[in-house]
Amino acid sequence: MLGYSVRRLLSAVPVMAVVALVVFSLLYLTPGDPAQVLAGDTATPEQIAKIRTSLGLDEDAHLRFARWLWHVVQGDLGASIFSGEPVTHMIGQRLQPTFSLLLLSVVLSVGMGVPFGVAAAARPGSWRDRALTTFTTLGFSLPAFIAGYALAFLFATTLKWLPVQGFVPLSEGPGLWLRSLILPAVTLSLVYAAIIARVTRASMLEVLSEDYIRTARAKGAAPRAILFRHALKNAAVPVITIIGIGVATLIGSAVITENVFAIPGIGRLTVDAILHRDYPVIQGVVLMLSAAYVLVNVAVDLSYTLLDPRIRY
Amino acid sequence: MKRRDFLKRASFAGGALPFLGRSTLAQKNAAKTLKIIHNGNLASLDPIWTTAPPTKDYAFLVFDQLLAVDSKYMPHPQMAEGWTFEDDGRTFVLGLREGLKFHDGEPVRSADCTASIQRWGARDGFGQLMMRFVDGFETVDDRRFKIKLKKPFALLPAALGKSNSSQCFIMPERMAKVDPMKQVTETIGSGPFRFLKEEFVSGAKAAWAKFDGYVPRKEPVDSIAGGRISAVDRIEWSFISDPSTAMAALVAGEQDYWDAPTLDLVPVMKADPNIIVSPRNPTGSYYMLQLNHTQPPFNNPKVRQALAMAIDQMQFLKSAVSDPSLLKPCYSYYGSDSPYASEDGAEIIKTNNLEKAKALLKEAGYGGEKVVILGVIENPTLGAMAQVAEDLLRRLGMNVQLVAMDFATMAQRRTSKEPTDKGGWSMFVTVWTGSDIVNPAVHQMLRAGGPTAWFGWPTDPEMEGLRDQWANASTPEEQKKLAIALQAQAFKTLPYIPLGSLVALVAYRKNLTGVFPCPVAAYWNIGKS
């Protein structure tokens, strides 16, 4: 197990190196000049050229890549072209809002999706099952920006129960922190709760038709015990897979939600960096996100062994 | 748990939501904090290094100016006690007010001022023009210094006190000695508010605290001149990129002030009795159709004239906003509040006749050369106007391609002097504030020095000559005559085509006090009742 974990983590290194190369190449090919944006409209071509030189943007691409990679290996992601701040510091400032949003969204998605799926599978064709179908269809169909605006209009603008926008750090109080995250987390979790509910239902239905479930029923086991102790654990592998994929996808979806609720997270940092062609920030964020994807996948793979003893690496 | 019990508990939890985490301390602090929704991303903290508007707005809180212009663009003392010209206008002497301090407690000295002027003069257009007249700087004592001039330069006070683009902000000498091509890393100024660097999250949040050591002038505020009074203890900027969210935050009272509301949301905000929507910047935003003079077809003066004859400014303005009170045609190369505003020579852009334009285009020998329009679609107004331009050119019978892109891509592509089929361009729509086009020194787009001119690179030695004469003129009357002559010549050369102006609005909560007309986003004097 430990050997497998180490092997999986080591195998991520070349993946991330390829990601770094691809991102760097794409940025190099993308039109747009940060020196122009920096210099402003009143700058002369000579001034723009000086800025480009001072930023090292006039050097050959392979030299820039080699230098950047060398610094990355030493843990230095460089500094923002615009603010001059270290990229690691900028990412650090944005981690808490994004991580908080993701954590709450995952909790809500799993907290809603798994019980819905189990309840629907327990009585296929019942009103609960039909309600689940309605919920999942809604969850799939509502884009985050529509759901976000609708929730903000209802709970923030009209009822004034929750804030419209912004993020309050945990250090300012768990209540304020939670208040600032409820609407964006619900927005973000709607679609994933729907997916998880669907997968849970399908997986549970399959397991509930197995012989050992019939045996458990025959020997008089309680319905709740059958559902949760016997069926859910065995139906969990595909659910865990979909949760893992969901966590990875949530990172991408957070961009829209962070924008709608003005949460200063990684998503907004990425969009701003792309619009300004702030290359070091884009490279740093993409590298960090690809590392997060790899870690999530490793965690999902390892969790299989805990749920199903037959799975061994 | 029974279903009824669950619902009972859930409704209790819902009822508790409004009170979740609210504290009396937070409410108390809110009364002293001015919360501003800022549209731009504050990235750099050096107003000399970049001309990005958010950096300028940041700098007006942190730094102070020696002089500052009023609403008629007349310079007044700000940090200065006063100034005089001596030696037949060849020496400018300035004395500082008593008690000026930087945020680190150090006094503001003459050496700080002369170093700051030189750093600004190396980067800013008006500053560079001024430095062509400067022979040297001389420190008389800690509160007085001289600027020695090669020849009289009557516009020197206007340059030091200008409100547009890059201003001459005063920094401590150690900061001002930093290479102007590199960013300063400190945020120490002598302005009314201290920047709270430890709270700064680039692109997300910025905060300032009232600087207790600041001594404002006694005169009433008038544009950027007059007393800069800290009317709140703290100012916070939030960068909210989504307009609907920004509006909702203002309506809900989470924010107090929105510096650039989206025009299509204005009717919603006007309907709210707690919100005031008003034009704070009296000069407005001026839209322009910039032409590439180095490539066909707009290297042909007659093609440029034909296009100018076809322009209907109202069509362009209405594409951005339907409310007629927010748009204003402008048949001048200067802003409507400029001392040089006039319509001399503007007949050609008042023609508004497609048939006449077509006839002139034919006479010009237009041979179907492709016109590439760079359309900045991320900006709704610039994007809409680019589409109107595309339609107009098609109706004129021109071969047009509108290329949609973001600003960063446009900013790079507009530097290309190549033909359109090799990555070049023919035109783009751009926007400047009224204070950016107030006089020939600050007006980048009225430059016609070919390679040294703004993108489009128009060449007209006569325009350049008139600018030099204006810079050397000794009286306001003479300056006005020459500035208007420059405009008349520009309407012959057509470095760009004016498209009119839109009123720049701000929206704020009714409990704000002291919001005054200003061409920049200045937040001093604004308090909360």
Image (spheres, coloured by chain):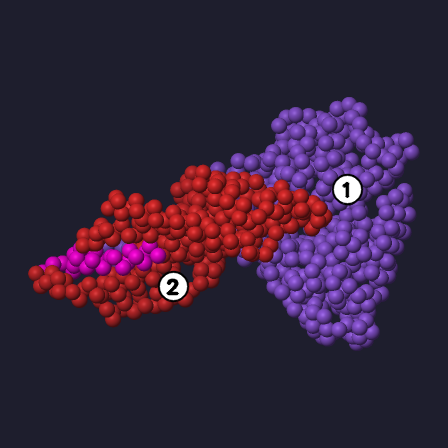
Chain colours: A red, B purple
Q: Which residue is mark 1?
A: B128
Q: Which mark is residue A139?
A: 2
Q: Circles 1 and 2: CB distance less than 8 Å?
A: no
From this viewpoint, which residue is outermost toward the left? A219
- Residue drawn at the location 10% of the way across and 63% of the way down: A215
Residue B492 vertical placement versus B237 (above, below): below
Residue B126 in the image: x percent, y percent?
Answer: 77, 44
Tell me which amino acid carries mark 2: Gly
Q: Residues within 10 Å of mark 2 (few under 14, many from 20)?
A: many
From this viewpoint, which residue is outermost toward the top? B141
* Residue A38 is at least partly visible in this image: no
As measured in the structure, the alpha-carbon distance from the residue carrying label 1 to the one carrying label 2 is 59 Å
Residue B342 in the image: x percent, y percent?
Answer: 84, 57
Residue B299 vertical placement versus B159 (above, below): below
Instruction: Decide which of B510, B202 is in the foreground and name it.
Output: B202
- Which quadrant of the figure has residue A73? top left
- Residue drawn at the location 84% of the way across and 62% of the way down: B492
Residue B46 forms part of the magenta stretch: no
Instruction: Decide which of A12, B78 is in the foreground and name it.
Output: A12
Instruction: Decide which of B35, B342 is in the foreground and name it.
Output: B342
Q: Left or right: A37 with respect to B330? A: left
Instruction: Decide which of B69, A281 is in the foreground and name it.
Output: A281
Residue A222 forms part of the magenta stretch: yes
Q: Left or right: A252 with respect to B252? A: left
* Residue A299 is at least partly visible in this image: yes
- Residue drawn at the location 88% of the way across and 38% of the way down: B152
Chain letter of disc 1 in the image: B
* Dot in front, 1 or 2: 1
Q: Which residues are magenta?
A: A220-245
